[in-house]
Image (cartoon, rainbow, N blue to C red):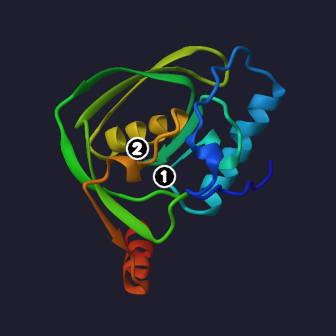
Amino acid sequence: MALRTIRLETDPLLRKKSKVIKKIDEKLLVLLDDMRETLRNVNGLGLAAPQIGSLKRVVIIEMEDRLYELINPEIVETKGTQRRKEGCLSVPGRNGIVERPMYVKIKALNRAGEEQIVEGEELMAVALSHELDHLDGVLYTDKAEEMFTLTAEDVEYEEEEVN
């Protein structure tokens, strides 16, 4: 496993559409492991492969002590709406208010190539929607109704919230 560099919003790669995974091989498993290590290193919630320079349709989300590895994820159902503050590892120092579904149902493959269904409400629905947007070259800043620059106090408070 290796830590990967997270690309920032000015990187043109983040605006490209990711390619469908046709074969789950050792390289893909290494990518998933590297994504997990990178996400944990920065204490994040989710990470899409383009954020570390790989245009593959892969995202990971770690929430409530569960790791979701989603290969070729597709949204198959959404319900309701919610407006929440979002941030992104590729957009450090800023947050924005974004409208997302309240409920999201995803179909994807796991690392063994088995189809899985992942459902999420509230924050999980936001995380799923946010990470899948990355696979299509969309950043949350494209959808934000308002943007905020974080102060040093905000960052300190958010770090306290995570622990």
Judge whether 150 appears above or below 104 on screen: below
Q: Residue at left 60%, top 28%?
A: 57
Q: Is residue 80 left or right of residue 108?
A: left
Amino acid found under the numbered disc labelled 2: Ala
The mark nearer the N terminus, 1 or 2, is 1
Q: Along the line of sight, which residue is nearer the eye, 26 or 97?
A: 97
Q: Dividing the picture into quarters, in which one does residue 133 lie?
A: top left
Residue that sits furthest to the left in the current view: 80
Can the viewer see residue 68 in this picture? no
Q: Secondary structure at mark 2?
A: helix
Judge whether 2 appears above or below 25 on screen: below
Labels 1 and 2 touching (C-beta < 8 A):
yes
Quarter in which the C terminus is drawn: bottom left
Q: Dividing the picture into quarters, in which one does residue 72 lie?
A: top right
Q: Dividing the picture into quarters, in which one does residue 127 lie?
A: top left
Amino acid found under the numbered disc labelled 1: Leu
Find residue 149 and report its horizontal and vertical position in percent.
38, 74
Judge whether 28 appears above or below 50 on screen: above
Q: Residue at left 41%, top 37%?
A: 128
Figure label count: 2
Q: Residues within 10 Å of mark 1 (few under 14, many from 20)?
A: some
Q: Which residue is label 1 attached to?
A: 45
Q: Along the line of sight, which residue is nearer the eye, 63 or 14?
A: 14
